[in-house]
Image: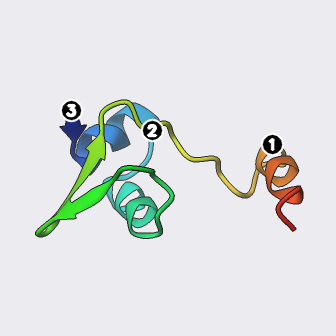
Amino acid sequence: MDYVTPKDKAAEWGLTQRRVEILCGNGRIPGAYRLGRVWAIPKDAQKPLDGRTRQAKEVFKGDR
């Protein structure tokens, strides 16, 4: 499996590098793990849903 850095995923997803690192730290990106000070993210990882959107609220509504 190929891995990329948060900087690469940030450019792909249109987020900041720090935001991607926070998503990794919160366990929102499956398969991401930390190598010392750097996160390794699977190359085929999907962008997590933004919890503030209507789409996410509908998805998370069933979890309550």
Residue holding disc 2: 14
Q: Is residue 54 left or right of residue 12?
A: right
Q: Position of residue 3 (x, y in %)?
A: 22, 39
Whichever of labels 3 and 2 marks the residue nearer the N terminus, that label is: 3
Q: Is residue 57 above or below residue 55?
A: below
Q: Which SS class for mark 1? A: helix
Q: Counting other residues with Cα less than 10 Å from the Cα at mark 3, is it few (<14), some (14-19), or many (20 or more)? A: few
**Cα distance, mark 3 to mark 2?**
21 Å
Q: Position of residue 23 (x, y in %)?
A: 45, 60
Q: Which SS class for mark 2? A: loop
- Which mark is nearer the camera, 1 or 3? 3
Whichever of labels 1 and 3 marks the residue nearer the N terminus, that label is: 3
Q: Type of residue at label 2?
A: Gly
Q: Which SS class for mark 3? A: loop
Residue holding disc 3: 2
Q: Type of residue at label 1?
A: Gln
Question: At 30% from the left edge and 33% from the top edge, which residue is drawn?
Answer: 43
Q: Position of residue 47 (x, y in %)?
A: 51, 40
Question: At 27% from the left edge and 59% from the top edge, which residue is drawn?
Answer: 33
Residue 55 numbered tag? 1
